[in-house]
Image (spheres, grey):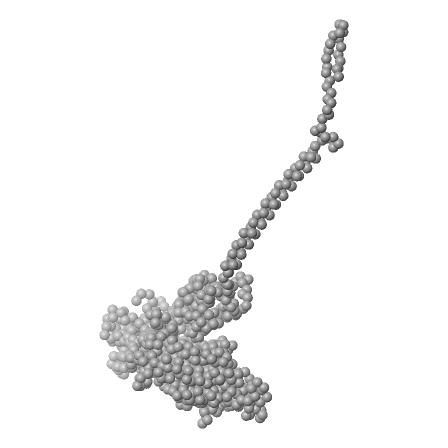
Amino acid sequence: AEGLNLCTSGSATSCEECLLIHPKCAWCSKEDFSSTKSITSRCDFLQNLIANGCAGAIENPSSSISVVRNVPLSSKGSGQSHLDVTQITPQKVALNLRPGDRTSFQVQVRQVEDYPVDLYYLMDLSLSMNDDLDNIRNLGTKLAEEMRKLTSNFRLGFGSFVDKNISPFSYTAPRYQNNPCIGYKLFPSCVPSFGFRHLLSLTDKVDRFNEEVRKQKVSRNRDAPEGGFDAILQAAVCKEKIGWRKEASHLLVFTTDDVPHIALDGKLGGLVQPHDGQCHLNEANEYSASSQLDYPSLALLGEKLAENNIHLIFAVTKSHYILYKNFTTLIPGTTVEILHKDSKNIIELIVKAYNSIRSKVELTVWDSPEDIGLTFTATCQDGLSYPGLRKCGDLKIGDTVSFEVAVEARSCPAEDTSHSFTIKPAGFRDTLEVAVTYSCQCGCTGHAAPASGKCSGNGTYACGLCDCDPGYLGARCECQEGASGELHHALCREAEGKPLCSGRGECSCNQCQCYESEFGNIYGPFCECDDFSCARYKGVLCSGHGECHCGECKCHAGYIGDNCNCSTEMDSCVSSDGQMCSGRGACVCGKCQCTEPGAFGETCEKCPTCPGVCSTKRDCIECKLFNSGRLADNQTCQKHCKDEIITTVDVLETDDPNAILCAYPVNNCVMKFTYLELPSGKSNLTVLKEPACSSAPSAVTIVLAVIGSVVLIGIILLALWKLLVTIHDRREFDRFQSERSRARYEMASNPLYRKPISTHNVEFTFNKLNKSYNGTVD
């Protein structure tokens, strides 16, 4: 192998140590293999051992898998024997794992057609549900008609709840004992409060359901929250009294119009004992521990519902939808639907929830050992593989989906240890049992020879090496402790001029006996190695993900790097939509390094400037606010949109320069919203309560607008013409005034007037009597 040889540099001194270094390391058990080589050369890559002449004596176990039980998947649920229905294959698998050597197997799951259904209707009978009680008096008949369209084997049961009949949850004064509604003008008569009452075991006689409903009357409790979680737990764990069938799909419909009490609320009434998760129904089928035990926690509810394969359906009013939707993320296998205030849509709600449950498959793991690593890859109906996902949605009844389950042992437990765990589709009774054994021992170890002549009678020969008895040393146990000499000393130097045993041990019988150190172990033929002089990360040797061998970190499977701080696992880089780093970066050391400008977040899921972000936010708005769109499934919505904080407003403000404005069409209208990425990594989405709609203008409006526009343009043109004429006239008048002011004549005379008489002067010269005269003649 090129570069660093992990096997030979691991300083393995036994076959078992060699197997732990790396899954590709093998051990040579041939007797004379190390005569010209060091002990550590026995641990090497398989091809190197074969090339060095060790063929036929190599210990190299690998992980293996065997299918113990593999009954084919069923195609239909209802038949002569429901117990024969199979929805997961295989049913049992045995694994033999070598640490670090990953192996995988395929699991197929199918939701079979016409599967039996048990539905238990659990109703809140507090005073505010009185109108709902009136509307479900014939629910059994109608619901059975609808459900028999989906399954031919349907049973229905009924139970009710109010709250613990202790203060401060209920009215406990003597005057209220028989009628807590005394003095309440709107409803003066009701029955005493109770915790949970099982009224009808699961039956296919739906008329009995109607009869029980008609008998019921509402009660009255003091505070707003109800004791519904007490009722859910009893309905889940009292299997015999409720009548849950092993071969049926279990639906528990929980109807209420208020919030529930949860664990620790019981302290208000002096109840400090946590719920024990057991059935406490008395002979009258009433919850007998209501005044002794606290309300159950969400974790306990989830555990008991999963143990009994029960799908919980929250049917709640719109005002409490968000709260119960958040509960679905904490209680696996639950869904939530909006119940009308009068429960008129209850049948539609149940059918919708059942179809939603049957449209998805999600694998869960029970009792997984800590030293076992599991990785899932889902192959859904589109034929694509989704690494890191264990869920498929949008399925039809009868569809088959497959999952590849990769299993890897991280370490070796104690000898002869075995483990097991269970893979189970959520809400199914079918399971896959996985039995795990570990391949940590070499076969040659079982043929060890004590006091072997190959070890000078002073040790045990196994796997090509001598394990010397106390007091003896040497490759063949030929020396006793304390023997010394210059020849032996020369064999204890790594090179000429170097100190004996690297200055960290004593030379005895041509072997170095390394000193003990408070920091760790010193080892090696010349004490040149130790397990504490390696790179650290945040003060932890090899980051806690590797072993220090001779100054170098040997990383555990799944980690690389000088200090083993770089994880090769890519599950943490898979975004909620199944893409690696949301398609905007690369997974480096188990963390996303975003390459798309503007992208950030653990999986680069935040990117205000990236194209297509508006459509992603739109999906979250539709599923969270309107329970619609492609993410309408409750758990899918919570997974994809867990970091979205949505606020509805009447008027959308767009003056924030950091907020991105988005819009999309909704029924000929436009829904607008803005989103802003917060420093915490969450997104703040501000959405209009109602889409912005504009009505199309009428033909009359258009004609009048055109006529008005023409008239207006004409008036404007006339005004411009008048303005130009006025300006021209004023300029001419000003010029006339200017010329008039420059004229130089008296104002009293007219320069154009001429007199009728004109005077002319004539100059002449004549000679009279020899006299000359000059004169003028008038």
The x, y position of residue 680, in whole percent, is 50, 69
Q: Residue at (51%, 87%) from the top-left corner? A: 218
Q: Is residue 244 visible?
A: no
In the image, taking residue 528 as reference, residue 746 lies left or right, namely: right
In the image, taking residue 365 as reference, residue 673 lies left or right, namely: right
Q: Residue at (55%, 89%) from the top-left corner? A: 189
> Camera-side residue: 118 or 535?
118
Question: Which residue ends up furthest to the front in the rendered image?
Answer: 756
Q: Quadrant of the N terminus?
A: bottom left
- Above/below status of 694 relative to 237: above
> Camera-side residue: 165 or 307?
165
Tell me where residue 765 sits by quadrant.
Answer: top right
- Above/below status of 445 relative to 696: below
Q: Is residue 54 visible?
A: yes
The x, y position of residue 335, in whole percent, is 44, 78
> Camera-side residue: 611 or 479?
611
In the image, taking residue 242 as reference, residue 720 lies left or right, namely: right
Number of numbered discs visible in the structure rendering: 0
Q: Quadrant of the C terminus?
A: top right
- Above/below status of 504 relative to 165: above
The x, y position of residue 271, in whole percent, is 52, 88
The x, y position of residue 631, in whole percent, is 43, 71
